[in-house]
Image (spheres, rainbow, N blue to C red):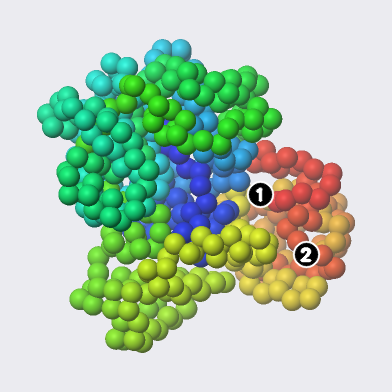
Amino acid sequence: MIYPIILAGGSGTRLWPVSRSLYPKQFINLYGEKSLLQNTVERLSGLDAATPIVVCNEEHRFIVAEQLKQIDCRATIVLEPEGRDTAPAITIAALIAQAKAHNSDPTLLVLSADHHIENKTEFTRSIELAISQSEAGKLVTFGISPTSAHTGYGYIHRGHCMVDNAVFDVNEFVEKPNHELAEKYVESGEYYWNCGIFMFSASTILAEVKKFQPNILTNCTESLKQISFENDFVRLDQEYFLNCENKSIDYAVIEHTSKAIVVLLNCPWHDVGCWSSLWNLMEKDQQGNVSSGNVLMHQTTNSLVRSDYRLVATIGLENIIVIETHDAVLVANKDNEEELKNLVNQLKAEKRTEYHHHRQVYRPWGKYDSIDEGNRYQVKHITVKPGEKLSVQKHLHRAEHWTVVRGTASIQNGDEFTLLTEDQSTYIPIGVIHSLENKGKIPLELIEVQSGAYLGEDDIIRFEDIYGREQETVLCKP
């Protein structure tokens, strides 16, 4: 049986403004009806696989849990207090897989949550071909036959053929090359794109981590000694985990080991890392355009235009990316797309909210949409899922006025407990303990008007929370 490890960290900055730090690309429906994470999980259906181990950032835990629930998948969700790249993440997951397999030696399949892979039959065939190699003590990497001289990927120089012109020794791992060198690699037919998918036994990868990165193995082992389980989440010891060096599994182990081999993954593969890559994989019209949402184009060619809310109209554009969201619009030339990372870093440095989250923010109980704000006031549209409840809390700097527009709200307002239905409202003064719950069968929607001297999301003191979020007696993030 295979133990899948799905790496769901990362911020997806090159897909801003749709991808944000608190809701990055792996959780977004960039095409089709499901997110990249959900598609990754469902890709495992043709394999004899255990429930996956998903490694993600602690800030994304409720998004991961909700998306897995939507596709009826139970998983072990490992929470990283802070990203340390793939070497610590895989080491942690390998140790957990050993424990789940009752200290036997499970075979691990490491997948990234942000890949698009077509032809699931061929994907399954390649994975099954790699199983015997991993059981023989090999560290299997998967290579993609390059379709262009791409300079954004690392390359694998294949060596001696071991099995059926599909399994090879590895001569060399090559860093992202310049265009001239990439063209030579493609022309030679001896190089594959390194797609970041791996297979190995838990004992083999842990032995190699111990050999090349003993610091990572020691700290990962210690970080699991006193793990806590919070609503099916695995929370690591923060101090030990943050002592791990920030390294990818490629740099830390794969490029140094003598046990690496490469298996050809002979199916269309895309690392959905930027808007151009999304344009490449999506169906185009006769003018070479990809569009979604409320879009009207005239004399526009080879462009990607996406509208999430408003009408977006273009005239006379070529090779352009236009992305519209509730609170931001990106217009960029596809040839300058690499500069988007610098723009996002500027947003981060200026502490702009557009870096962190959308106008619509997801919570374990539902979501809220910041409709309007001004001096000393803010208006939100709040949606609470059936059976869910906000924490019992109070605020030190703001009062709130709630008006129900759909469903029935069970409300605690100080010592008073009431039910409010559509068109009914309540006022919560500053400093009063309150809570909101949806005991009904349909989503609860209400309009919240906040007023006060400070309206930041960190003005909250929690007393009870059904989602295991920390109870605080000082200002903390919700």
Percent coordinates x, y for residue 119 in the rendering: 21, 46
Q: Which residue is mark 2?
A: 455
Label 2 neighbourhood size at 10 Å, few (<14), some (14-19), many (20+)? some
Left or right of 245? Residue 398 is: right
Label 1 neighbourhood size at 10 Å, few (<14), some (14-19), many (20+)? many
Which is more toward the observer, 318 or 101? 318
Q: Is residue 478 visible?
A: yes
Percent coordinates x, y for residue 467 in the rendering: 65, 41
> Which quadrant is the N terminus positioned in?
top left
Q: Is residue 348 above or below residue 439?
A: below
Percent coordinates x, y for residue 339 in the rendering: 48, 64
Secondary structure under the numbered disc 2 in the rendered image: loop
- Identity, as a three-letter code, of the amino acid under mark 1: Lys
Percent coordinates x, y for residue 290 in the rendering: 31, 70
Which is more toward the observer, 256 or 331? 256
Q: Which residue is mark 1?
A: 389
- Identity, as a three-letter code, of the amino acid under mark 2: Leu
Which is more toward the observer, 244 or 368? 244
Q: Is residue 255 above or below residue 177?
A: above
Residue sitting at x 67%, y 64%: 350
* Extreme residue in the left direction: 164
Q: Nearer the viewer, mark 2 or mark 1?
A: 2
Label at residue 442:
none
